[in-house]
Amino acid sequence: MATNTAPSSAQYLNERGTPDWDALPFEIRCSRCGYNLRLLEQPRCPECGLDFTWPDIIQHQLAHNGVIFEYRWRNRPVRSWFATVWRCLFPTKLWRELSIHDPPRVGPLLVFAISINLGPGGLLWGFGRLAILGLRLWYKLWPSSANQSEQLIQTIYGIMAVSVQLGRFLIHPVVSLFSFGALAGAFFLVLGMRQTLGRCKVLAPQVLRSVIYGFVGAYPLIILLNWAIQYLRRSYYLALLPQVPLDLLFWTDFLLQHLPPLILSSLYLRAALRNYLRLPHAGALAFSAWLVGILFAWTMFFAILLLFGNR
Ligand SMILES: [Zn+2]
């Protein structure tokens, strides 16, 4: 994420293109596993095998001046928030722009993950509520002009009602709890597997960044899909109920709700593990991570039901 205004890595390199270790004002550590690279000649981490170039790693560790929320939350919180969400939707582009050599910031990352869960829902809900109030006020204050634009008002009213419903669905405690449970499960699985992946030991903040940005990318699609299914379900349940056995209906429903989110989030996480962390078997790892994540979320959900449900 280097720009023209960033300090240049050139002044820290000698004629052979390797770092001038005495001139460097900071330690260079492997961006993936944290191993100290001081006095190495070859641009390859002896600990985890990550290949890099010296100008790249020095440049990124010097600069951190990209547009994403992690680096910009202090001076451009709103703009960088939207810029980051937008980038997460297109993972190939995101991971081309955000390099493994840009060190993650855990605090802003967590704030970003929480705000993704609650921010859009709150906004949709609040905006819809306000607009509906405004329309009612219009009816009350200027009944004649409101009656003339009846059609328009009905349309706006319909859209706003959907906005309120979607918002309420997004900030529903069960939906949030499930999302965070799955996120935590996926994070701990990748974290636990990092030792098993050949020699790859990956820093926890790097795993956190991959899982969160992968999740944020898949999240809007998952929510829309899930929400559409909630609506479809009502009609197809009633239509099918007399003909189809109940348990078959239950399993179709269960798969319909879980398979698309599992596939989507795995694809997004796979992009991060492969293009960003450059890990082997990224697809299998991403799929198992979200499978475990969803199972973990369900376990958590039932545990809470058992603990508090009977009171
Ligand atoms: Zn390394």
Image (spheres, grey):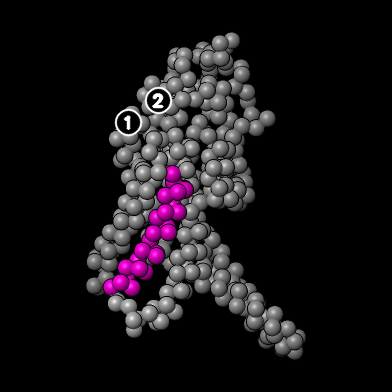
Note whether residue 84 is visible. Answer: no
User: Are the residues flagged by discs 2 and 1 in contact, CB closer than 8 Å?
Assistant: yes
> Tag 1's secondary structure?
loop
Q: Is residue 296 left or right of residue 20?
A: left
Residue at the spot 32% in from the left edge and 78% down from the top edge: 244
Whether residue 133 is situated above or below residue 251 in the rendered picture: below
**Dot 1 alpha-carbon crowd within 10 angstroms: few under 14, some 14 to 19, many 20 or more:** few
Badge number at residue 55: none
* Vertical placement of residue 10 versus 178, above or below: above
Q: Nearer the viewer, residue 104 or 98?
A: 98
The N terminus - image quarter: top right
Q: Mark 2: is the Cβ under 8 angstroms from ligand 1?
A: yes
Mark 1 C-beta to ligand 1 under 8 Å = no
Residue name at image x 56 percent, y 11 percent:
16
Decide if residue 132 is on the left or right side of residue 25: right
In the rendered image, residue 249, in percent from the top left (x then y), is placed at: 33, 73
Q: CA distance from mark 2 to mark 1?
A: 10 Å
Q: Which residue is mark 1?
A: 198
Q: In terms of secondary structure, what is the magenta stretch mainly?
A: helix
List the single residue furthest toward the front. Answer: 243
Q: Label 2 crowding class (10 Å Cα cut-off): few <14, some 14-19, many 20+?
A: some
Q: Which residues are magenta?
A: 247-270
Answer whether residue 255 is magenta in the image.
Answer: yes
Q: Residue at x 63, y 74 (%)?
A: 131
**The disc labelled 2 sits on which kind of residue?**
Gly
The residue wearing badge 2 is 49
Residue 303 lies left or right of residue 141; in this view the side is left
Labels in figure, total:
2
**Where residue 68 sits: x, y (%)?**
57, 43
Residue at position x 56%, y 66% in the image: 124
